[in-house]
Image: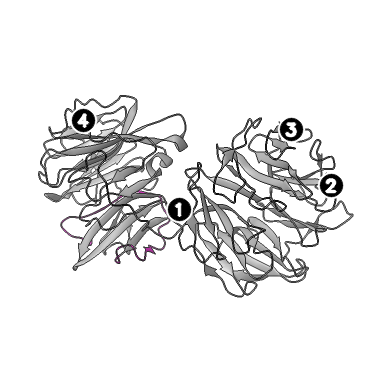
Amino acid sequence: MNSKSKWIVVFAFWAMAIVLPACGQVVTPWIADGPQQATILSFASDPFHYGTILAGTYFGGIYRTTDSGNHWTPIQTPFSQYSVYSIAFDTKANGVIYVGMFEGGVYKSTNGGTTWTTVNNGLSDLTAEVVAIDPLDSQHLVVLTSTGVFQSSNAGGSWTLSNKGLEGINARSIAFDPHHKGTIYIGALFAGAFRSTDEGNTWQPYSNGMGPYSIVTMNFDASGTELYAAAADGYAYKLLPNTSNWTLISVGLPQTPIGEILPHPTIPHVLFASTGAGIYVTIDDGGTWYLSNSTPSGLMLSDGLGYVFYAIGVHGGLYATQDAGTSWFGVLDGFQNVFVGTLAAVNNSNTSVLYAGSDFGPWITASQGNSWGLVPDFKRSIFELIADPSNPRNLYIGTEKDGVWKSTDAGFNWSQSSTGIVPRQINGIAQSPAAPNVIYAATATGLYISRDQANSWSTATSSQLPSMYCVAADPLRYVVAYSGSINGSVFKTIDGGYTFYPLSTNLPTNENVLSLKVSPKFVDQIYICDYLRWGTVRQCRRREFMVSCQRGSALQRACRRRRSEPAVDTVPGDRGRRSLQE
């Protein structure tokens, strides 16, 4: 199963396993209460409103801050489910913004982000990785896509392919010369730099002194005369005025990918370098570098005045400095761009503890979501996390690529418990309070079972079942369990996992059963959530809930809802006070 299908959006819905509200019934509004974390792909400062920044996230749309990053709020947009690769403000027209995204093309706003329209006429490749505006002509735009360079001469009204001289080249960065109309520089993967002097109609290689490296960002200094280029190969260069040779300035930097060389907006020769080994600063134009922050970082941004600088963490996060790099602090308040794939709640010593499995690893809160802690040294994508109903200190995690892991100290330390499972993509784990030694694991190759609390595993049946996406153990009867599979298939055991048989359901055969829950209160009441694949991973959506009160047969629609609504999952033992939201 593709990881994005599993992570699409998962909410905690406390009542789902007990009773579903009737269609149309008013439900208490959800509040954002998840871990403050984000994978940020792009950001840009509003040139007309100091302190206003937009940040594009991974499959989470755009967030905005109006106080220099102290707090962020998501913007409601038509592309809130997209990955936003690029953001560009028109420096000559207040409120005009362009964003480029994965498989969504380019959107434009003329009112500061209140409303958005697509501007994709002629844009044959809708993966817009970079959007740039000519500082000398706001009607002139350039978009770098996965297949070529496109230009617009009418502010996005239409686009034309401008690849002459770039055939077979994968462009990744761009810089307009602010003093010479029509001169544009482009950085490419494995090909160095290119230049156009006719507004992008034709391009020529421009890599003397550089070599065929992958240039991922390019920036002019405040004077607009010196151009800096950062390479993913671990090199950095500058291009001085009236020269055609690049000068190496990365001597003294570690040989790790360099995400950006950011010039200080007011002080000449002061540069920031974001690298895979941290952030470095130079005050002599690259002659000598000093380590400023050891966090691996990618893109950087300044406030335009030199008071605040920002850096995106390679492994998530956003950091800022107000003293030119002497100290850094996190600025993630309000961000919730974590793919929470699973939840578990336990009552540990009369304290309600909530666990969230994510693409960053496991999170823990004992304050009803007011604060979260990420378990250190467990950087694995988690598809399932359950608590042992007989011992709340015992927890089990199912990972995307690394099998089952077990904790015996309430989630602070983990050890692998996957002996016998091959391959190790774990889509679901289940354990019944009536039989705590028996654990089921739904995997990419079928269903596995452990009868010794995950110390060893074997296939659940003599003839292996197909790929399993989820599994649920009956909390009232230890010999009963259900598993969901491909093509709308649901299997059931009534002998403790020794044999499984298919249930006759009315689920569509072109949909996969990705979530299955058994009511802890009503015997034989189960809930199923299935998905319909529309062609791409990004477009997977929940189709409908199915409910059965007849031991899994004769599944019925519980409440038909719009396909744009999120999928849900249960939180066993949670009191329903709060929720997690992507």
Spatial CA distance of label 1 from label 3 is 36 Å
How packed mark 1 is, by other alpha carbons closer than 10 Å (few <14, some 14-19, many 20 or more), is many
Secondary-structure class at tag 4 = strand
Spatial CA distance of label 3 from label 2 is 24 Å
Label number found at residue 167? 3
According to the image, label 4 marks what residue?
556
According to the image, label 1 marks what residue?
337
Count the labels in the image: 4
Q: Going by the picture, which residue comes out furthest to the right?
A: 242
Amino acid at circle 4: Gln
- Horizontal side of 183 relative to 343 (left or right) equals right
Q: Nearer the viewer, residue 64 or 147?
A: 64
Spatial CA distance of label 3 from label 4 is 55 Å
Q: Would you identify the image quadrant in which residue 302 lies?
A: bottom right
Find the magenta span and give its range: 366-394
Which of pointers 4 and 1 lies earlier in the amino acid sequence? Answer: 1
Horizontal and vertical percent position of residue 532 = 37, 31
Is the C-beta separation of discs 4 and 1 under 8 Å? Answer: no
Amino acid at circle 1: Asn
Which residue is found at the position 19% from the left and 68% from the top?
Answer: 349
Label number found at residue 181? 2
- Which mark lies nearer to you, 3 or 2? 2
Label number found at residue 185? none
- Which mark lies nearer to you, 1 or 3? 1
Is the N terminus in the top left, top right, bottom left or bottom right quadrant?
A: top left
Q: Would you identify the image quadrant in which residue 389 lies?
A: bottom left
Asked if residue 26 is positioned above or below residue 146 in the image, the reply reads: below
Q: Is residue 372 magenta?
A: yes
